[in-house]
Amino acid sequence: MRRASFEEMDCSIAQALEAVGEWWTLLILRDALFGVTRFDQFTERLGIARNVLAQRLDHLVAHGILNKVAYQQHPVRYDYRLTDKGRDLWPVLIALRQWGDTWAAPNGPRVQTVHRTCGQIITAEPTCSHCGEYLHSKDLRPVPGPGAIEPTSISGANSPTIPKGRDPGGTEAQGDS
Amino acid sequence: MRRASFEEMDCSIAQALEAVGEWWTLLILRDALFGVTRFDQFTERLGIARNVLAQRLDHLVAHGILNKVAYQQHPVRYDYRLTDKGRDLWPVLIALRQWGDTWAAPNGPRVQTVHRTCGQIITAEPTCSHCGEYLHSKDLRPVPGPGAIEPTSISGANSPTIPKGRDPGGTEAQGDS
């Protein structure tokens, strides 16, 4: 059964997942960020079936996340290179890695990150674009943005106290409605 | 066809995806971060089939991301509340949203974030835990961490120039091998 498309959902997370929320896509992107560009490299590293990989790569090309450029003509062979849009996903990958490092790595992180600027092994810390402070989930509040639509739920009923995927209401999140 | 498990892959991203890399899981987590706790609220907001939701919620409880607490006995009804492990996924969600805002929101962001500490609408900017500078993908280099295993590829061949999902080699990422 084909899942419902996320495209109709009025939410940037849903839109993002439409592009990258597939089984293998985030691992393909991780490898692309490592510099992997060739089909056989992806299959070798990921152990992914060739037909699945081909489908996932085509999806990423269609979404403008990878560019497909022939490096050989007879037979034709392609490099799959990250676009700016694709490379801009790195915060998602690093956040996933750091969460996995904290919660699913009993032997410690398998891969660490060196920041070339200061030369240290570091973690990426989300900070406030305005005041520069480290961010904490409890200090963040969702409000409607310029792209918000009218507050109508998928089922037709309103839920005025909690911003919905389809209708961010802009009020404080509540535990119950 | 059941997909191969990510569990055997030696990579925190793969481990993270084992927990949260499912179709609906990240949207369920987004709603949980908004304060949604009840089954009927999730189904109404997401338009998700009840059996799929039940399966996803059980998966998140099994992974220690949600706690299931009865708030009513006859019939029994549950709240599904984020654990610390679950709440710690917020940087993944905010990174996805901000990427969607940049690349998939032609009318502007649908939901924005207010930082209670400074009162402004803000974005989360990944910064260096050591030097405090904003991070850029090109300034980051992967190296093996304490949990790294021996460099053996899935197919048995080595790829010494590029850290693999299963065998981070610690060398600079190269475009070709």
Image (tube, coloured by chain):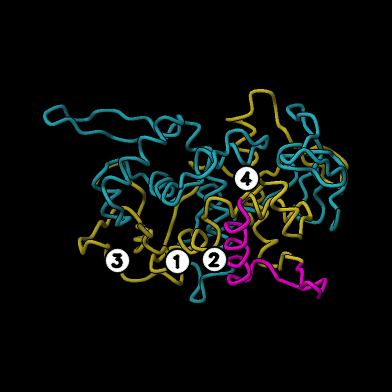
Chain colours: A yellow, B cyan
Amino acid type of disc 3? Pro
Q: A135 and B116: which one is in front?
A: A135
Report, in whole angstroms, how far the alpha carbon at label 3 lies from the one at label 1: 12 Å
Residue A65 lies within the magenta run:
yes
* As drawn, A125 above or below A22: above
Residue B155 is situated, as x and y percent measured from the top left of the image, at 73, 41
**Residue numbers of the magenta segment:** A49-78
Quadrant where the N terminus of chain A is found in the figure: bottom left
Residue B147 is situated, as x and y percent measured from the top left of the image, at 73, 27
Q: Are marks 4 and 3 on the same chain?
A: yes
Tell whether label 1 touches label 2 (CB within 8 Å).
yes
Q: Quarter of the image holding residue B160?
A: top right
Q: A108 and B72: which one is in front?
A: A108
Residue B72 is situated, as x and y percent measured from the top left of the image, at 17, 30
**Helix, strand or loop at disc 2?**
helix
Q: Which mark is residue A151?
A: 3
Mark 4 or mark 3: whose residue is earlier in sequence: 4
Residue A161 lies within the magenta run:
no
Amino acid type of disc 1? Arg
Q: Residues within 10 Å of mark 1 (few under 14, many from 20)?
A: many
Tell whether label 1 touches label 3 (CB within 8 Å).
no
* Circle 4 or circle 3, nearest the eye: 4
Q: Chain of mark 4?
A: A
**Residue underneath mark 4:** A95
* Circle 4 or circle 1, nearest the eye: 4
Report, in whole angstroms, how far the alpha carbon at label 4 lies from the one at label 1: 22 Å
